[in-house]
Image: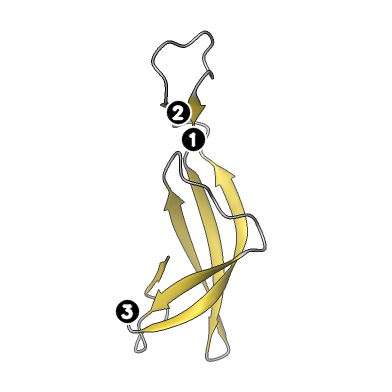
Amino acid sequence: MDKQTEGIVVSVKKQWWLKINSKQPRTDPLDGATFPHIIKVTYTVDGNDYTKWKWVNAGLPAPKVGNTVQVLYSSDKPSKAKVI
C-alpha cells in the first residue's frame, strides 16, 4: 500500500444479526445494544472505478453516505486497497 486517494461512502448497512451488549443489567432485548456496520466505498484510480467494503466495529462511529474517506492502495494493483 504505497499510494493514497479519497473514496466516497456509497452505502452503510447495520448488521442487525450481530448484537453486542454494552451494559450488564438490561431491561429489554435492545437495551444497551450496539451493532457493527459494513460500509461500501468507491474510489477512482487512473480513470478506473473500484469498490471496497469495510467492517466497522460496534461502538465506533460509521461514516455517513456521501462522506469521503482515505483509501490506501497498491500502485501495481489498485484493486488491492485498504480503507482508513
Label 1 element class: loop
User: Which residue corresponds to mark 2?
Assistant: 19
Label 3 element class: loop
Q: Is residue 28 above or below residue 35?
A: above
Q: Is residue 64 above or below residue 81?
A: above
User: Which residue corresponds to mark 3?
Assistant: 1
Separation of marks 2 and 3 at Cα, in angstroms: 33 Å
In the figure, is residue 64 to the left or right of 19?
A: right
Q: Amino acid at mark 1?
A: Phe
Residue 73, image quadrant = bottom left
Q: Amino acid at mark 3?
A: Met
Picture coordinates of residue 58, whole percent (x, y): 44, 39
- Which mark, by number, is residue 84? none
Q: Which badge, 2 or 3, comes first in the chain's sequence?
A: 3
Picture coordinates of residue 63, whole percent (x, y): 57, 55
- Which mark, by number, is residue 35? 1
Q: Amino acid at mark 2?
A: Lys
Q: Are the residues tagged 1 and 2 within 8 Å (C-beta)?
A: yes
Crowding near the residue tagged with mark 3, few <14, some 14–19, many ≥20 C-alpha atoms within 10 Å? some
Separation of marks 1 and 3 at Cα, in angstroms: 29 Å
Residue at 54% in and 76% down: 6
Q: Which badge, 1 or 2, comes first in the chain's sequence?
A: 2
Q: Please name whichever residue, 27 or 43, is drawn nearer the observer in this view of the structure.
A: 27
